[in-house]
Structures are given as structure tokens and as C-alpha cells.
Image (tube, helix red, strand yellow):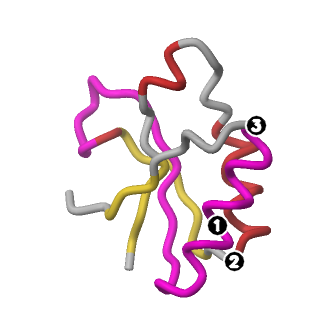
């Protein structure tokens, strides 16, 4: 299944560092890590997308939270 790390309100005051987030996803067990414009719209910011099994998702979440430094990270199913 495809997921993405949402560019949520936390990133209004903190940088959305796509390269650090992508490396954290790979360390956490994610695969096929890519960047895409949010919702597929060219006027939206780029977000990091990835593939993961439901069991690997917890590891990805923990890894991204650690690298970003907060538990307020939202990972959503990529349905666009």
C-alpha cells in the first residue's frame, strides 16, 4: 500500500526536510520512496510517498518521528 508523510500544521513552524524524512522511511522499513506534489496538484508542496506493509508502518512512523523530533507526524494512505 502507498502512504505519504502529510505536510501537516507541525511543519508550519518546522521545516519539512524531504531528504531526512525519506532516509528515515527507508530505515524504518518503507520501500519505493518518492516525492510527489500533494494530491497530485502542481500548486501543492512536495511530500514524501512510500510503500509499506501494515506491519512495517509502525517502524516507519517511529523512525520519522525520531528524525523530525516530534510525535506529531501524520502518515496517510495515498489515495490520489
User: Relative to 2, is 52 on the left or the right?
Assistant: right
* Few, some or many residues within 10 Å of mark 1 (<14, 14–19, 20+): many
Q: Are marks 3 and 2 in contact (CB under 8 Å)?
A: no
Q: Are marks 1 and 2 in contact (CB under 8 Å)?
A: yes
Q: Are marks 1 and 3 in contact (CB under 8 Å)?
A: no
- For image coordinates 46% across by 47% down, the residue present is 74
Image quadrant where residue 58 sits? bottom right
**Label 1: element kind:** helix
List the residue tagged with mark 1: 60
> Gap in Å between the C-alphas at discs 1 and 2?
6 Å
- For image coordinates 60% across by 81% down, the residue present is 56
Disc on res. 69 = 3
List the residue tagged with mark 2: 29
Q: Out of 59 and 21, give the one closest to the viewer.
A: 59
- For image coordinates 76% across by 56% down, the residue present is 23
Which segment is the magenta one? 39-68
Residue 64, horizontal then vertical, whole percent: 68, 52
Image quadrant where residue 24 sits? bottom right
Vertical position of residue 4 compared to residue 73: above or below: below
Does the magenta-highlighted stretch encompass residue 64?
yes
Vertical position of residue 5 compared to residue 72: above or below: below
Residue farthest along the top direction in this orientation? 13
Amino acid at each position: 500500500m502507498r502512504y505519504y508523510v502529510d505536510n501537516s500544521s507541525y511543519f508550519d513552524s518546522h521545516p519539512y526536510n524531504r531528504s531526512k524524512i525519506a532516509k528515515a522511511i527507508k530505515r524504518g522499513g518503507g520501500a519505493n520512496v518518492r516525492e510527489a506534489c500533494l494530491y497530485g496538484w502542481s500548486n501543492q508542496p512536495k511530500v514524501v510517498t512510500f510503500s509499506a506493509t501494515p506491519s512495517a508502518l509502525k517502524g516507519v512512523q517511529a523512525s520519522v518521528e525520531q528524525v523530525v523530533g516530534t510525535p506529531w507526524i501524520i502518515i496517510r494512505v495515498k489515495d490520489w
